[in-house]
Amino acid sequence: MAMPEQREGIKRLRLYQAWKGNNIFFCGGRLIFGPDVASLFLTTILIAGPAITFCIDIILKMNKDEKQHSTILGFPVLILTLLMTIADLTFLFMTSGRDPGIVQRNTRPLDGDEAYNATTPSMEWISGRAPRLRLPRTKDVIVNGFVLKVKYCDTCMLYRPPRASHCSICNNCVKKFDHHCPWVGQCIGLRNYRFFSLFISTSTFLCIFIFIFSWLNIIDQKKHYGNSTWKSMKHEAMSLVLIVYIFIMVWFVGGLTVLHCYLMSTNQTTYENFRYRYVKKDNPHNNGYWRNFKEVFFSKIPPSEHDFRSFMDEETIEVGPYTPNIGINVTSMKEKFGIEMGNKFAVCDNMTIPSILQNLDYSSIEDNEDVKDQTDDNAFDPLGIHFSQKCHRCSPRHSASKSCGSENEASGNERAAKEAPEAVNDERTTNQRYSNMV
């Protein structure tokens, strides 16, 4: 049975709709991309364009007569090109459209068991409590007998797992963070690095395959142009364009493939290679060449920590650490006095006033409080926010006090200034009587 979108007046959102990162979701949260997902279309064109052009050239050669028919570009080459192109695009979208290993962020700072007590207003609890805890910037963890330092992420409010890092583009902490690739529009991490390495490797093989067979086609066509390579290149313009294009591209994808083959053989990430330089010190993650490659290609990919289609209550969504509004749980002096005396300013939903206090005459105290508050409210509230919320349901003297309040307001500032000293004396006398009575 489908879960209702509304429950008891609370708006329910799916996790991807309330996601705090910069990711872009498609298909109802089934596909997750980075904020630069538009570059994925450019990458698709750069791969599919030359591959389709090469396939068209093969088909044209196959439809020519036997004299000009190419013995190099045939049906087997066409099938291999199509298969490698489809595989390359598949690995591209599997890299770009999946969770790279995003670490589940905390909705509030860590507990005191994991922190040292100190004073810092930036680490207050979201719920309104202010434990004022300062977390140590780093802490030590042991990995394969090596002591590593892991950093505290202020955005995700957690200590990052070993080899994790925060991507400033996607605004997420990613496990085994390698880099953010603008060509695939996604972070490369623990859960998509295998497909990324297959993507760049397949792209390199596809480039080399088309480059070689384009040259072979030009050489094969020399026999129709007096064994002249230059004339053959002029008449095989499509093959010549592919050779020039692929010669430029293969340096990029080929160099990237060689780099990541080295990183996989030593069990490093691009981030670790440029930051820590394990060449000069021991790599705590290196398990040997074969085990390192096995870890990348044959290990089980861990499940995602997030179910982006799961429902969550909008009111339970936390937005991160912040200093609570000073207006929360702030009670004015008037409200406190009203709660003690049981007058019209009391918050009386769950309060019972003793019977001995209900029959007392508080009109003079209420009048004096109205006069005093006109001169003292601005001094009490540093931001100029007046908390004069009144309860009109519980006070038995509501009608009488209301008329007194309207008369005092009409009297003006001059009358308030004259009566203020007398109001203070009356208040002191009343407080003494009240204390003796109790």
Image: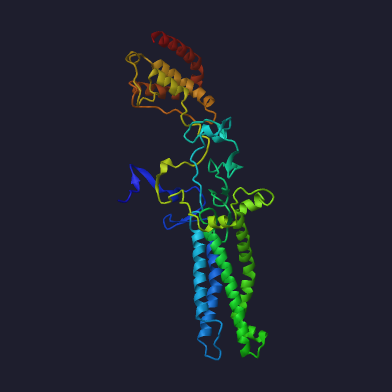
What sort of colour scheme is used for the picture? rainbow
Asked if residue 336 lies left or right of residue 150, the reply is left
Q: Which quadrant does the C terminus fall into?
A: top left
Work out whether 47 lies above or below 174.
Answer: below
| 381 vs 318: above or below | above
Query: Residue 93: in sight, yes or no?
Result: yes
Residue ID at (56%, 71%):
206
Name the foreground residue: 20 vs 356. Answer: 20
348 and 236: which is toward the camera = 236
Q: Residue 74's spot in the image, x, y percent?
A: 52, 82
Q: Position of residue 363 (x, y in %)?
A: 39, 17
| Residue 411 appears in view | no
Total numbered badges shown on the rendered structure: 0
The residue at the point 48 percent across, 14 percent down is 424
Residue farthest top in this picture:
436
> Does residue 384 sit above or below 168 in this rendering?
above
In the picture shown, does residue 36 fall above or below 435? below
Q: Nearer the viewer, residue 346 or 133?
A: 133
Residue at 43% over, 54% down: 29
Q: Position of residue 189 (x, y in %)?
A: 54, 53
- In this view, the residue farthest toward the left is 1
Q: Position of residue 409 (x, y in %)?
A: 44, 24
Residue 395 image-quadrant placement: top left
Q: Nearer the viewer, residue 300 or 430?
A: 300
